[in-house]
Image: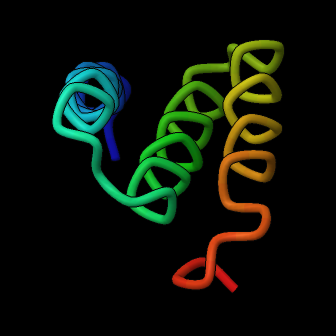
Amino acid sequence: MIRHEYKDALNYFLTGLELAGKYRNSKSTISNLQRKTGEAYEALDSFRKAKEYYQASLETGEGDAEYN
């Protein structure tokens, strides 16, 4: 992907996370969005933010039957 496409994707993932929390989506959905957000941050060389979202993804998905 091109850099600006990662920025667009990041905005979509962050909006998705906001909506997933609002509508109480499953842990696996939220965990997946957190992982994808981390991937977008990593592609944009924001490694600290990427790590935060990767860690959150692991913590969110832990113990979720759909995730495991």
- Quarter assignment of residue 64: bottom right
**Residue 65 picture location, percent across and down:** 61, 83
Residue that appears at 67% across and 48% down? 60
On screen, residue 11 versus residue 40, left or right, reads left
In this orientation, which residue lies closer to the viewer: 48 or 30?
30
**Residue 52 picture location, percent across and down:** 77, 23
Total marks placed: 0
**Residue 30 picture location, percent across and down:** 44, 48
**Residue 46 picture location, percent across and down:** 69, 14
Residue that appears at 21% across and 26% down? 22
On screen, residue 45 versus residue 11, left or right, reads right
Rendering colour mode: rainbow
On screen, residue 55 versus residue 34, left or right, reads right
In this orientation, which residue lies closer to the viewer: 52 or 44?
52
Residue that appears at 82% across and 13% down? 48
- As drawn, 24 above or below 67: above
- As drawn, 4 above or below 29: above
Residue that appears at 26% across and 38% down? 20
